[in-house]
Image (cartoon, rainbow, N blue to C red):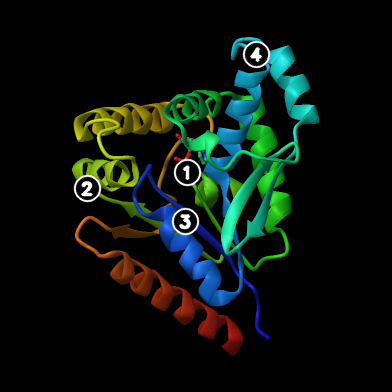
Amino acid sequence: MGKRLVIAIDGPAASGKSTTAKSIAKLLGYTYIDTGAMYRSAALAAFRAKISFDDIDKLKDMLEHISISFQISADMQIVLLNGKDVSKRIRDADITKLSSEIATIPIVRHKMVKLQQQMGDEGGVVMDGRDIGTVVFPNADIKFFLTASTRVRALRRWKELPEGAVTVEQVEKDLVWRDKNDSSRSVGPLLKADDAIHVDTSGLSVQQQINQIYSQVKTKINSEDMT
Ligand code: DC
């Protein structure tokens, strides 16, 4: 068996990262690591413990005791916070907003980045997020940066929500806020690595998007096997 790569997929919310990363991991028999779920879990833990994001000492203490892990159950990935399944709760709008806020705090990023580096240090991982190709694995074997127009991304998210829950305009407004917050922080902002392959998924079907990325990954794997 050839080298098992580290594959980094970054991009803004709803750009197609997780759908693509999950499929590529499955096709290759790699582990998928959803780093957004880790920030979401940290936000949920702070929310439940009623810790203000200004209280760095309390956050530090929380981070020292927190356990975030992934498990596969019935072909679905579930996220465990201190051993309990939080997969659903971390997707709610309040925690989504808080995850972007907590992700601006340097000690939180420091802890998450360290965990992510440990999870991927043996290779055979597809990791998606905002700073994977720039900070977590700057030497990743192959990097992608996915984008899509704001409208397309809002529509994608809106279609996943229960009918009548919110308007597409509200979803779009939340996305724009999050993009701005994720891009403007000083530590580990949402940024394309210089050597990342840019894929605009606006006009692509899910299958086209997966095919396009998978074929580039296969080319990389074949070239690694020849060396
Ligand atoms: O990918 P997501 O939408 O689940 O991420 C939720 C939030 O977590 C996102 O708004 C910013 C933050 N995040 C981050 O700062 N760095 C990452 N590598 C992944 C997510």
In front: label 2 or label 3: 2
Q: Does residue 211 sit above or below 47 in this rendering?
A: below
**Residue at 42% from the left image edge and 54% from the top image edge:** 17
Q: In the rendered structure, which disc, 2 or 1, sits on the residue that comes first in sequence?
A: 1
* Three-letter code, disc 1: Arg
Classify 10 Å Cα crowding around label 1: few (below 14), some (14-19), many (20 and above). many
Foreground residue among 201 and 131: 201
Locate residue 215, reporting x and y percent: 40, 78
Determine which quarter of the picture holds residue 6.
bottom right
- Residue at mark 1: 130
Disc 1 C-beta below 8 A from ligand 1: yes
* 3D distance between C-alphas at marks 1 and 3: 8 Å
* 3D distance between C-alphas at marks 4 and 3: 31 Å
Classify 10 Å Cα crowding around label 4: few (below 14), some (14-19), many (20 and above). some
**Side of 42 relative to 179 (left or right):** right
Locate residue 25, reporting x and y percent: 54, 68
In front: label 4 or label 3: 4
Badge 2 vs badge 3, beta-carbon distance below 8 Å: no
In the rendered image, which quarter contains the C terminus? bottom right
* 3D distance between C-alphas at marks 4 and 1: 25 Å
Mark 2 secondary-structure assignment: helix
- Residue at mark 2: 152
